[in-house]
Image (spheres, rainbow, N blue to C red):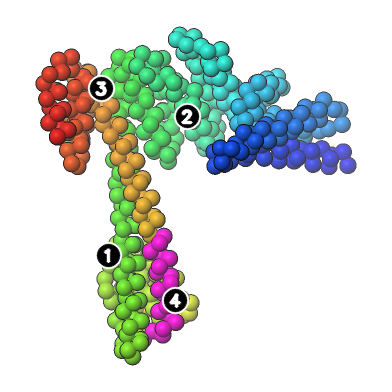
């Protein structure tokens, strides 16, 4: 019975901590007038759960540490510290992590997560004590040491703790972001190298995030007087940008073709309705074949999708990715007709079948339009990221022309910028040229011409 009560208490404390964090995460979506009330409610939930947890830990009739269900487990201490950090209750977070570290925990994910909390608390000291200059740098580097210790734990458990490597980079960025500026970023070179190398070794799928870190590392290397290393990092970032851009263009084209397919199919539905009303035969429906659109049925390739009056999808299983699947659904329910059957039989759908297909194609058009907008925004965001990489590359190249790596990078980045549409790349180059020369009379003329 005691064990059952202990497990129930454990679950209640976990639920209360989770509820507190969920309230905090929901605050940005609330009306400004009720945000303070929600914040107070989250803090009250946190304090009550931690108070209950503390009382339970001091009792002798509860499960001891090491049990995942016990109130004295290592895990609950870390969860309460993370919840306190989410609520910006740094003193409570420090107390919980201190209690956790006194228990001599094993080198597992909970120790790494506790070290993340320690790093955030150490970085907060800069604001609490209003540190600046070298004192602020030293305090933030102290926080970085905790993050690197957590990274060591993650790298000693490959595959299993890969998520901790990524989390290390996120916590690292939160701590060092104020130091990424001229004159201060040089102190981040050793630690940022470790973070970037860990992500590269992991080949993390979040490539835009890796690009952000590589740009920051290149800036730090340049600030430390290492243009060759900065050029190498920016070259890697450019390669990542190139791969992402190719995929983004393909995704945008797919969305565009799907939208065209929906428009053509709706036009066919309108024409088919008139044919049925006039008692005439209909033309065969449009076919989505890969990224190509043809008018008329037929074909039995793997990338062909044809809506048929019998329902289902004619053609291969792939059916032109999402477009084929939607096309098949739009045809309604019933037996699946093959492409050959569409060719052989007269196409005479009923009015109900056409209206059902029309309704489904309207849904496809709406979804395709939304997808198209998302892909366009993603491509624009990627364009801004590429621009940041290229400008940093030009900056490094211009300040270190004697370095071969930097010189090659300058040439490559300049050529890429000149390919930008509407002369925007030429204007950006002129801006960088103006910044990098002491005698700005000539560059200013070039800048004026580029802006025109």
Query: Which residue is outermost to the front?
Result: 33
Residue positioned 53% across, 23% down in the render:
147
Which residues are the magenta region? 348-367
Mark 4 or mark 2, which has the lower sequence index? 2
Give the quarter of the figure containing the N terminus.
top right
Mark 4 vs mark 1: in front: 4
Mark 3 or mark 4, which has the lower sequence index? 4
The quadrant holding residue 210 is top left
Query: On the picture, is 54 further left or further right than 348?
Result: right
Q: Give the SS element for disc 3.
A: helix
Residue 306 in percent (x, y) is at 36, 73
Whether 336 is drawn above or below 25: the answer is below
Whether 336 is drawn above or below 227: the answer is below
Mark seen at residue 169: 2
Q: Give the SS element for disc 4.
A: helix
Query: Which residue is outermost to the bottom?
Result: 279
Q: Marks 1/2: CA distance?
A: 42 Å
Mark 3 = which residue?
396
Mark 1 = which residue?
292
Whether 75 is drawn above or below 118: the answer is below
Q: Marks 1/3: CA distance?
A: 44 Å
Mark 2 or mark 3, which has the lower sequence index? 2
Whether pointer 4 and pointer 2 mark residues with C-beta atoms closer than 8 Å, the reply is no
Query: On the picture, is 155 further left or further right than 434?
Result: right
Q: Give the SS element for disc 1.
A: strand
Dominant SS in magenta: helix
Query: On the picture, is 58 further left or further right than 177?
Result: right
Residue 173 in percent (x, y) is at 46, 26
Whether 202 is drawn above or below 311: the answer is above
Mark 4 = which residue?
356
């Amino acid at each position: 019975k005691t064990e059952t009560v202990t497990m129930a208490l454990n679950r209640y404390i976990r639920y209360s901590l989770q509820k507190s964090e969920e309230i905090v995460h929901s605050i940005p979506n609330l009306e400004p007038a009720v945000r303070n009330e929600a914040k107070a409610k989250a803090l009250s939930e946190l304090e009550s759960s931690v108070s209950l947890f503390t009382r339970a830990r001091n009792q002798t009739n509860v499960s001891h540490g090491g049990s995942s269900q016990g109130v004295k487990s290592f895990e609950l201490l870390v969860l309460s510290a993370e919840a306190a950090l989410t609520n910006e209750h740094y003193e409570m977070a420090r107390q919980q992590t201190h209690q956790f570290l006194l228990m001599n925990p094993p080198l597992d994910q909970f120790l790494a997560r506790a070290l993340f909390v320690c790093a955030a608390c150490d970085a907060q000291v800069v604001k609490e004590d209003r540190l600046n200059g070298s004192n602020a740098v030293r305090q933030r580097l102290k926080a970085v040491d905790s993050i690197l210790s957590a990274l060591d734990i993650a790298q000693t458990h490959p595959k299993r703790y890969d998520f901790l490597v990524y989390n290390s980079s996120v916590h690292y960025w939160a701590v060092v972001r104020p130091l990424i500026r001229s004159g201060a970023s040089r102190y981040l070179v050793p630690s940022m190298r470790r973070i970037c190398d860990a992500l590269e070794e992991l080949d993390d799928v979040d490539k835009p995030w890796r690009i952000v870190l590589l740009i920051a590392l290149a800036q730090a290397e340049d600030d430390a007087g290492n243009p060759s290393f900065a050029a190498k990092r920016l070259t890697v970032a450019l390669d990542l940008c190139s791969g992402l851009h190719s995929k983004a263009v393909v995704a945008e084209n797919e969305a565009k073709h799907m939208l065209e397919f929906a428009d053509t199919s709706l036009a066919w539905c309108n024409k088919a309705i008139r044919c049925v009303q006039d008692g005439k035969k209909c033309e065969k429906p449009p076919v989505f074949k890969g990224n190509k659109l043809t008018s008329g049925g037929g074909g039995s390739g793997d990338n062909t999708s044809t809506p048929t009056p019998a329902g289902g999808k004619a053609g291969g299983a792939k059916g032109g990715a999402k477009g084929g699947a939607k096309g098949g659904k739009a045809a309604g329910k019933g037996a699946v007709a093959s492409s050959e059957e569409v060719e052989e039989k007269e196409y005479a759908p009923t009015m109900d079948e056409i209206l059902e297909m029309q309704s489904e194609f309207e849904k496809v058009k709406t979804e395709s339009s939304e997808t198209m907008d998302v892909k366009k925004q993603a491509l624009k965001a990627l364009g801004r990221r590429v621009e940041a990489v290229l400008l940093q590359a030009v900056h490094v190249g211009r300040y270190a022309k004697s370095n071969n790596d930097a010189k090659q990078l300058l040439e490559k980045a300049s050529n890429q910028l000149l390919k930008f549409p509407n002369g925007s790349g030429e204007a950006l180059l002129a801006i960088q040229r103006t910044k990098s020369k002491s005698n700005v009379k000539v560059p200013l003329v070039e800048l004026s011409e580029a802006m025109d």
